[in-house]
Image (cartoon, rainbow, N blue to C red):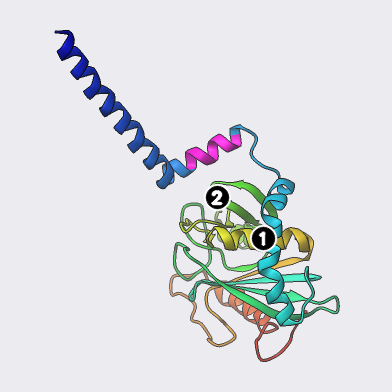
């Protein structure tokens, strides 16, 4: 009996160990696991922006500086413009000199972005916003590594929503790490580190964000058939702003 009990205990122990190992793998690789890790870090207090800059700043700046040098822009630039293009899934980085002359520095691929062409209208529509925005804050303890919080909904979004009679516009739109997204721009962890450090070095007040459905510099772009009537005017505003940032001319403010 004791021998049988010992064998049973060994089998049970092996099953328990295997289950724990499987559970650990699940927690590491699934969205639920990533959320659990993020929630634990939040409960533990997370990290500060200063701590993240100390952790990732040196390597990120070493990656960034050659691109700025090649573009003829000192690092950190006096001003920064980020242009996110939904159709091509790209995020362009433009650096500005003190005289407000901008030059294209580099382009990052967007690894994931949900939704389709057209503006974000409400919570849960999975849309990436379209419009002229700012980076509202830096998020050092994001569920997806590091993140830049977009100031959606901005005042223009709220004005259009009131005119339409819409409410519950959603929020928490981020440019973040990893490669999964629901209404955000997922850039991968290393690109998120670059952008986090760069925006911190430039300053929120000196950073502009343009989120466009298509590259209006090379493509007229059709308004989606089911989009609100004001979308054509919004696209005109985005097109005009983007026209200042072209590879064949020096972008100017």
Helix, strand or loop for disc 2: loop
* Image disc number at residue 59: 1
- Residue 206 image point, x, y percent: 78, 65
Q: Is the magenta stretch mostly helix, strand or loop?
A: helix
Quarter placement of the C terminus? bottom right
Q: Residues within 10 Å of mark 1 (few under 14, many from 20)?
A: some
- Residue 118 image point, x, y percent: 50, 69
Front one among 181 and 161: 181
* Image disc number at residue 147: none
Question: What residue sits right under mark 2 in the picture?
Answer: 168
Q: Do the residues labelled 1 and 2 touch (CB within 8 Å)?
A: no
- Residue 100 image point, x, y percent: 81, 78
Q: How crowded is mark 2: few (under 14 residues within 10 Å), some or many (20 or more)?
A: few
Q: Is residue 17 above or below residue 59?
A: above
- Residue 79 image point, x, y percent: 78, 70
Q: Give the range drawn in magenta.
A: 35-42
**Relative to 139, 187 lies left or right:** left
Query: Which of the two labelled residues, at mark 1 and mark 2, occupies the earlier sequence position?
Result: 1
């Amino acid at each position: 009996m004791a021998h049988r009990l010992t064998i049973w205990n060994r089998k049970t122990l092996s099953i328990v160990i295997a289950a724990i190992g499987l559970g650990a793998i699940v927690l590491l690789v699934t969205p639920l696991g990533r959320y659990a890790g993020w929630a634990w870090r939040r409960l533990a207090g997370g990290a500060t922006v200063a701590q993240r800059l100390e952790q990732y700043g040196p390597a990120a700046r070493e990656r960034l500086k050659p691109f700025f040098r090649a573009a003829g822009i000192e690092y950190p630039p006096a001003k920064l413009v980020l242009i996110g293009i939904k159709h091509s899934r790209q995020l362009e980085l433009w650096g500005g000199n003190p005289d407000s002359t901008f030059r294209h520095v580099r382009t990052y691929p967007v690894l994931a972005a949900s939704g389709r062409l057209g503006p974000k209208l409400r919570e849960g529509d999975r849309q990436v916003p379209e419009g002229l925005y700012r980076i509202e804050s830096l998020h050092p303890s994001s569920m997806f590594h590091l993140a830049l919080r977009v100031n959606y909904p901005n005042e223009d979004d709220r004005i259009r929503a009131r005119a339409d009679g819409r409410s519950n516009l959603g929020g928490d739109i981020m440019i973040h790490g990893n490669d999964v997204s629901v209404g955000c721009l997922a850039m991968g962890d290393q690109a998120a580190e670059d952008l986090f450090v760069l925006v911190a070095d430039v300053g929120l007040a000196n950073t502009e964000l343009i989120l466009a459905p298509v590259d209006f510099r090379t493509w007229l772009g059709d308004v989606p058939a089911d989009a609100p009537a004001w979308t054509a005017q919004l696209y005109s505003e985005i097109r005009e702003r983007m026209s200042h940032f072209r590879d064949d001319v020096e972008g100017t403010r």
